[in-house]
């Protein structure tokens, strides 16, 4: 963990490759968050649709409530660095879509300030071998009013369940789309995002009608 | 992820002058696009220079963090300085709404269809 000044100085020389530079006309950006457990394929999905090689951003998380009001406890306050991969899709000349893959450890997903705020919605990527990872996050997305769809990443050795059975197991309302996907495949990952957008469209229509 | 390890808390403290993300402008989102108003000027802090250099074309806060290998909260503090000094401007993200605008969703669908 020794601070290496020369490496940090080198980072300050970095920047986007010429092909990754956004046009001057890019004026607005939106984001979608890809949520899921460790190894479920979030970065794969981001990478398969992104126009840039996925980048990694990080944030320093401070364990809330530990030593905050205790001056003697400042040194013992635990802070953790959490990394997140993200990619980018230029929608048109003005609008850019960013896709963020949540860090592997579930407890950090909702601590990352500004990750879900303002997001168009979320994709919950699930692995049928480890469905239990998804229970808590589904509840918390509902609590926060973040619209989401569920994408089942088709690992070759994972058991296949009918959608109705998965819906039951995840206790999801009928309206929430559940789609199979292959996160390695660009078209398949694109279709997952399309499913989310069409769902958002339905929600907007329903709201306008009510 | 080991790439990040050289960024020690002590160094980050020095970069921001001890300020935390709480003093950063609240309107800066991970996807706020930042554009420099001019080129880097001599005498600027190296981190400020780096941001101004890479933001000659629009770049999101998340991308700035990724390229410069600095945590988002540190980048937002630095951007706060640059915004105060009128060296960059922020193209705000689409305002967060409970449900996004239909025209916006339709634009995203059109864009995805062309992928």
Image: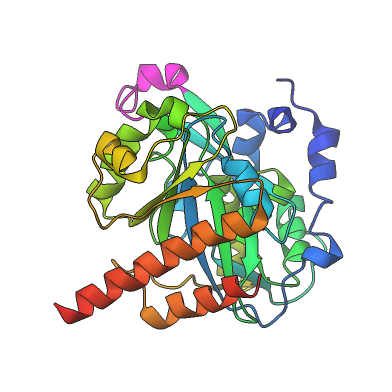
Q: Which residue is nearer to you in this view: A18 or A189?
A: A189
Q: Is residue A109 magenta?
A: no
Outermost residue to the left: A210
Residue found at x 40% / y 62%: A118
Give the answer, above or below, for where A106 lies relative to A17.
above
Q: Is residue B83 above or below residue A72?
A: below
Q: How many marks?
A: 0
**Residue B72 coordinates in the image, percent (x, y):** 56, 48
Q: Is residue A41 left or right of residue A77?
A: right
**Residue A195 % position (x, y):** 44, 62
Quarter location, residue A189: bottom right
Query: Is A73 in the magenta?
Result: yes
Residue B78 visible, this orientation: no
A7 lies above or below A87:
above
Highlighted range, magenta: A64-78
The rendered magenta stretch, by its main secondary structure, is classed as loop
| Residue at (76% x, 63% y) in the render | B54
Q: Quadrant of the C terminus of chain A?
A: bottom left
Quadrant for the N terminus of chain A in the image: top right
Q: Foreground residue, A120 or A201?
A: A201
Query: Residue A63: where, in percent of width, then height?
Result: 39, 27
A197 horizontally vs B91: left or right: left
Residue B51: image location, x then y, percent: 71, 59
């Amino acid at each position: 963990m020794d601070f290496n000044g020369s490496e940090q100085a080198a980072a300050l020389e970095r920047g986007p490759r010429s092909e990754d530079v956004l046009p001057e006309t890019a004026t607005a950006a939106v984001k979608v968050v890809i949520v899921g457990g460790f190894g479920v394929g979030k970065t794969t999905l981001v990478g398969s649709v992104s126009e840039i090689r996925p980048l990694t951003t990080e944030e320093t998380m401070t364990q809330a409530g530990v030593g905050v009001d205790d001056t003697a406890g400042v040194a013992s306050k635990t802070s953790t660095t959490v990394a997140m991969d993200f990619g980018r899709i230029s929608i048109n000349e003005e609008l850019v879509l960013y896709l963020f893959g949540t860090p592997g450890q579930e407890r950090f997903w909702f601590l990352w300030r500004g990750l879900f705020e303002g997001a168009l919605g979320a994709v919950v990527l699930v692995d049928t071998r480890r469905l239990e990872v998804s229970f808590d996050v589904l509840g918390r997305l509902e609590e926060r009013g973040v619209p989401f769809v569920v994408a089942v990443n088709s690992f070759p050795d994972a058991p296949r369940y009918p959608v109705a059975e998965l819906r039951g197991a995840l206790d999801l309302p009928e309206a929430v789309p559940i789609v199979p996907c292959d996160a390695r495949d660009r078209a398949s990952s694109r279709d997952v995002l399309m499913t989310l957008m069409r769902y958002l469209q339905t929600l907007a229509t329903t709201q306008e009608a009510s | 992820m080991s790439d990040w390890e050289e960024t020690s808390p002590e160094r980050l403290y020095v970069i921001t002058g001890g300020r935390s993300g709480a003093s950063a402008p609240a309107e800066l989102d991970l996807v706020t696009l930042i554009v420099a108003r001019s080129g880097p000027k001599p005498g600027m802090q190296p981190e400020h220079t780096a941001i101004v250099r890479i933001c000659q074309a629009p770049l999101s806060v998340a991308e700035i963090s990724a390229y410069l290998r600095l945590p988002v909260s540190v980048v937002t503090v630095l951007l706060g300085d640059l915004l105060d000094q009128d060296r960059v401007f922020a193209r705000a993200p689409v305002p967060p709404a409970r449900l996004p605008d239909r025209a916006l969703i339709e634009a995203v669908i059109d864009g995805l269809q062309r992928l």
